[in-house]
Amino acid sequence: DVGKGFLLYLEDISVSFDGFKAINGLNLYIKEGELRCIIGPNGAGKTTMMDIITGKTSPDHGSAWFGQRINLLEMSEPEIAQAGIGRKFQKPTVFEQQTVFSNLELAMAGDKSVLATLFAKLTPSQIDHIDHVLAQIGLSEQRWLAAGALSHGQKQWLEIGMLLMQSPKLLLVDEPVAGMTHQEMDRTGQLLTDLAGPHTVILVEHDMDFVRSLAQKVTVLHQGSVLAEGSMNDVQNDPKVVEVYLGE
Ligand code: ADP
């Protein structure tokens, strides 16, 4: 049991870029079904941490286990995605000309050809899977709309839905609420909360009010390692955290 019972187990990870330690002795332990919020000032190492989890960047030091047996450091980026880690970047990248439904269909097919996918006949269970994801992301009524006609918030949900088509165990979500209306933020909070449990979610977020509203465990990164961890209330009253944020 090298993963020590955690779904994601990062221990003593370090990465340098040209001698600069972007990640410096990072430990991160995520339980299955958790929704973990990662905050920290610019340059804290949040993006680099996500790059390590998804295999985009290889650390110089440390260990990274997914589940009890999967050594992330021995796997390529596509192998890690295949193993059940999905990542949503900040900007939505949906196929604007295609319907919401087709976007999900394409995401289900993965890297198969677009034309072959759109002309293939879906099985009833594939249709059920798409219907289920449409309901999860609250876009059932928009299924025949071109994705380009959706609001910014709806595009973000569609992209989360596209990740869900691959049934990931772990979802990494980068600042989903940037640019959203308050109402869209509330719905996104509900969506992320609902996804935790059946999935595990790591959320990197700058919007502190949004993080507070989720009422989940928060990890504060600073200079490539964990500065504080706990409830939003705990971390925001931690003098070390206050100093880092006021000094930004
Ligand atoms: P965050 O996402 O928290 O803003 P990053 O992970 O993007 O932080 O960056 C952490 C530090 O590493 C920053 O100082 C950044 O300039 C540096 N860094 C990140 N990627 C590279 C790279 N490819 N080459 C050189 N420096 C990098």
Image (cartoon, rainbow, N blue to C red):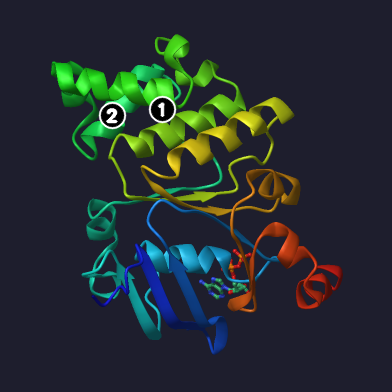
Residue 142 rendering spot, x and y as whole percentages? 46, 12
Q: Which residue is mark 1?
A: 95
Identify the residue at image location x=41%, y=74%. Answer: 10
Tell me where residue 83 appears, x and y as whole percent.
Answer: 23, 55
User: Where does the C terminus fall, quadrant-wise?
Assistant: bottom right
User: Residue 134: x and y, percent?
Assistant: 39, 21
| Residue type, mark 1 in image | Phe
Q: Is residue 205 left or right of residue 6?
A: right
In this view, the residue in front, 106 or 204, is 204
Up/down of 30 relative to 127, above or below? below
Residue 55 location, quadrant = bottom left
Q: Quadrant of the N terminus?
A: bottom left
Q: Give the spatial CA distance, label 2 vs label 1.
A: 9 Å
The number of callouts visible is 2
Dot 2 and dot 1 residues touching (CB under 8 Å)? yes
The relative height of residue 177 versus residue 121 in the rendered view (above or below) is below
Q: What amino acid is labelled 2 in the image? A: Leu
Q: Is residue 209 above or below residue 63?
A: above
Q: Is mark 2 within 8 Å of ligand 1?
A: no
Q: Along the horizontal axis of the image, is 212 left or right of 166?
A: right
Relative image position of residue 230 (x, y in whole percent): 63, 65
Secondary structure beneath label 2: helix
Q: Nearer the viewer, mark 2 or mark 1?
A: 2
Quarter assignment of residue 39: bottom right
At a point 21% along the width and 70% down the height, the residue shown is 69
Chain-order first, disc 2 or disc 1? 1
Ligand 1: does it lie within 8 Å of the C-beta at label 1? no
Q: Quadrant of ligand 1?
A: bottom right
Residue at 41% in and 20% down: 135
- Residue found at the far right of this picture: 246
- Mark 1 secondary-structure assignment: loop
Residue marked by disc 2: 106
